[in-house]
Image: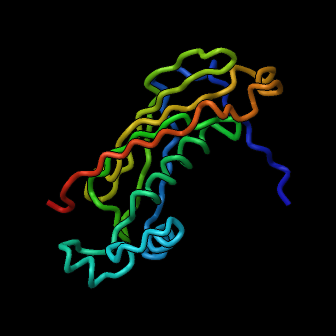
Amino acid sequence: MSTHTQQSLEWTSIRVGDEIPPLDVPLTASVIVAGAIASRDFMPVHHDLAYANKQGAPDIFMNILTTNGYVARFVTDWAGPHAQLKSISIRLGAPAMPGFLLRFTAVVQRTERQGDLGLVDIALRGATDIGDHVTGNVVLLLPASDRTRLGKAHQRDETIGLGLIVDVPRTVGG
């Protein structure tokens, strides 16, 4: 059993221009198929190579829900367990296929106080061997300090809600 407890970042310690440590995700067919199954996306291009080839793709490719999950993981792993996702706005680009390394990078674009919490706006990129798979912004709410975290501010604010905005190009692969 691990005794390690992850600390949350405090928004007052975050500065515009701060870079989030990269996250590398080696893509395998199993990762891509498992993500599609877990998100109940049974479109054959995510698990059937022959079907993907007939659609003009060189291989199966990751679905948007799995991509969105990795985006959320990337920023919340950095920010810690007290971070609340306020919004995710992403655009898909090049397909993410088996054998690729999907590398997430990001930079803080804006910070702003909101009561006892702080808003952090992050611009991110997830790139593979053939280009940007995903680009976009994530907005987080973080506690201002340990004192804030121990008070009511650490409880989920049900008025916030998570807004997901997805911009999918009309054509894939050309």
Q: Nearer the viewer, residue 39 or 53?
A: 39
Q: Farthest residue in the bottom direction? A: 50
Q: Nearer the viewer, residue 82 or 12?
A: 82
Residue that appears at 34% across and 68% down = 61
Q: Quadrant of the N terminus?
A: bottom right
Q: Nearer the viewer, residue 43 or 3?
A: 43
The quadrant where residue 55 appears: bottom left
Q: Outermost residue toward the front? A: 159
Name the quadrant containing residue 9: top right
Q: Is residue 174 left or right of residue 58?
A: left
Residue 125, position in %: x, y? 38, 43
View extreme (left): residue = 174
Residue drawn at (31%, 51%), measured in percent from left and top?
A: 92
- Residue at image position (46%, 32%) is 122
Q: Quadrant of the C terminus?
A: bottom left
Scheme of image coloration:
rainbow
Nearest the viewer among 137 and 27 is: 137
Q: Position of residue 166 (x, y in %)?
A: 36, 46
* Residue 13 image-quadrant placement: top right
Q: How many marks?
A: 0
Against 3, residue 83 (above or below) is above
**Which residue is pictured at 56% across the width and 23% down the height?**
119
| Residue 27 % position (x, y) | 43, 67
Judge whether 120 appears above or below 94 on screen.
above
Q: Position of residue 151 (x, y in %)?
A: 82, 24
